[in-house]
Amino acid sequence: MELEEAIKKRKSVRNFSVKKPSWRDIIQAIDYARFAPMAGNIYSVKFIFVSDREKIDKIAEACQQEFVGKVHYLVVVVSDRENVKKNYDFYDKQFGAQQSGAAIQNFLLGITEKGLSTCWVGFFVEDQIKRTLSIPEKMCVEAVFPIGIEHQFMKGRSKTKIDLDSILFFNKYGKKNLDSDDTKPSFDNS
C-alpha cells in the first residue's frame, strides 16, 4: 500500500471481526514508530503489546468503553516524560505529547497498511492501566489501541474528511489565498 493510500484509508474502527489478526503485523506497525522524530533523539515512547485476555478486560474497564475489550490484542502507548524533562526542563509535557503523537501516527499508518483496524482511545483511568500492566509511576499512559480486523458489515463506511481550504491559511491566520506576491522571494535586508 502506498503512503497516500494508507493516509486516506486510516480511520477509527470500533466494530471488529472475531477473526484473530496476525500479531506479527502489529509488531511491524510498532516498528514504524521507531522512525518518528524525537526531540534531541531522546526516544521516550514505549509500546506495550497486550494479548492476555484478563488484562484486556481490565484495560477495557479502565477505558469505560466496551469495544476496547472486543479484540484479541491491545497496544498501550506510554512515554517517559521525566526523561524528556532532564534535557528540556518545563517543555516535558509539550515535547512528550508531540513525540508520542508522531510515533503513534507512524504506528497507525502501519496498522492501516497491514489491513488492520483500531481506534485511538484517549479516555481511561490511567492508574488502573498502570496497575494492570505494571507500568512505573513516572511513565505517562498516552493512549490505548484495540487492534483487530474491521467487521465486514462496517467496511466501506467512513466519515467525510474536512476540506483542505478549511484548515489551510497563508502567511497569517485566516488568510485563505496565496497572493502572487507571496510566492516571490524577498531580498530586502531592511
Image (cartoon, rainbow, N blue to C red):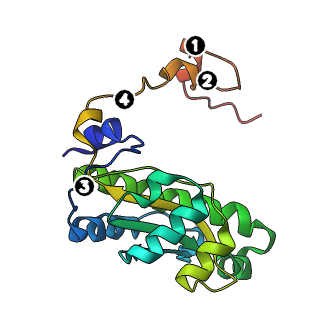
Marks 1 and 4 sit apart, C-alpha to C-alpha, by 35 Å
* Residue identifier under label 2: 170
Q: Residue at x 26, y 68 (%)?
A: 28
* Residue identifier under label 3: 18
Marks 1 and 2 sit apart, C-alpha to C-alpha, by 9 Å
The quarter of the rendered structure image containing the C terminus is top right
Marks 2 and 3 sit apart, C-alpha to C-alpha, by 47 Å
Q: 49 or 89: which is nearer to us?
A: 49
Q: Is residue 47 above or below residue 112?
A: below
* Residue identifier under label 1: 179
Q: Residue at x 72, y 82 (%)?
A: 86
Give percent across and percent down for residue 184.
54, 23
* Residue identifier under label 4: 158
Quadrant of residue 137 in the image?
Answer: bottom right
**Circles 1, 2 touching at the beta carbon (< 8 Å):** yes
**Circles 1, 4 touching at the beta carbon (< 8 Å):** no
Foreground label between 1 and 4: 4
Marked residue nearer the N-terminal end (2 or 4): 4
Marked residue nearer the N-terminal end (1 or 2): 2
Residue 153 can be seen in this image: yes
Which three-letter amino acid code belongs to the residue tagged 4?
Ser
Give percent across and percent down for residue 18.
25, 55
Which three-letter amino acid code belongs to the residue tagged 2?
Phe
Give percent across and percent down for residue 45.
53, 73
Foreground label between 2 and 3: 3
Give percent across and percent down for residue 113.
24, 51
Quadrant of residue 78 in the image?
Answer: bottom right
Q: Is residue 118 left or right of residue 66?
A: left
Q: Residue at x 21, y 44 (%)?
A: 2
Q: 159 or 4: which is nearer to us?
A: 159
